[in-house]
Image (spheres, rainbow, N blue to C red):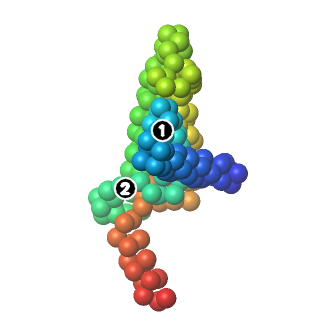
Amino acid sequence: MKIFDRIEELIVIVMLALMTLLTFLQVVMRYGFNAGFTWAVELTTIFFAVMIFVGISYGVRTGAHIGVDALIKKFPPRVGRAISIVVVLLCLFYAGLVIYGSWVYVSKMKLVGVELDDLPIPIWVVRSILPIGYALLVLRFIQVLWALVTGRSDRLHLGNEAEDALRLKSESSES
């Protein structure tokens, strides 16, 4: 699974780098040479979509999504784990609905055969990131569910912004 983690990270990094580079080039072309690429905004939007939809699964893996767990912390670990399992199951259900809906949408776009406005790419190819991204999210939630069911985790792994800020503060004061 480590290779999958690295590929996921690489995709996010490459998409962010390509977005930044293309936007920079567009600004230079526009203001430096009074020209530009007609397709730059559309391609940047595609890079952004890929980064976001791969990034949602990355966020689940790293615990980067904002979560409200004040209520769960009030319960004993066993009850908190049970609540977390229910929450993950609801997340899986929601992701399944999005996968189904986006699959129907992408299928219809393929039947229609429309291309993007500025690039000769069929819309269905680009919009395929919707079901792919949510399928990746399902894989991550299955990992979280497995950790909860097997007892390796006692609650849904969520980022704790207060603890992170205090840790960073203490690390910066030590240097």
Q: Reading the chain from its start, which is encountered first: label 1 or label 2?
A: 1
Residue 60 is at least partly visible in this image? no
Residue 46 in picture, x, y percent from top left: 50, 36
Please name whichever residue, 14 or 37, is drawn nearer the observer in this view of the structure.
Answer: 37
The residue that appears at 40% across and 80% down in the rendered structure is 169
Crowding at label 1, few (<14), some or many (≥20) Cα neighbours within 10 Å? some
Residue 7 appears at what percent x and percent y?
Answer: 65, 49
Q: Disc 1 vs disc 2: which is toward the camera?
A: 1
What's the residue type where badge 2 is placed?
Answer: Ile
Task: Say which residue appears at 34% left-offset and 63% top-offset.
Answer: 73
The residue labelled by disc 2 is: 66
Q: Residues within 10 Å of mark 2 (few under 14, many from 20)?
A: few
**Residue at left 46%, top 19%?**
105
Q: Is residue 33 shown above or below 42?
A: below
Task: Report the side of 20 relative to 75 (left or right).
Answer: right
The amino acid type found where label 1 is placed reads Gly
Label 2: state its secondary structure: loop
Residue found at x 49% / y 88%: 175
- In-front residue for pair 151/161: 161
- The answer to whether residue 108 is seen in the rendering is yes
| Nearer-the-camera pick, 140 or 14 | 14
Q: Is residue 105 left or right of residue 3?
A: left
Please give the count of numbered marks on the rendered protein.
2
Cα–Cα gap, marks 1 and 2: 38 Å
Pick the residue in front: 132 or 17: 17
Residue 36: mark in rendering: 1
User: Relative to residue 45, is residue 121 drawn left or right?
Assistant: right
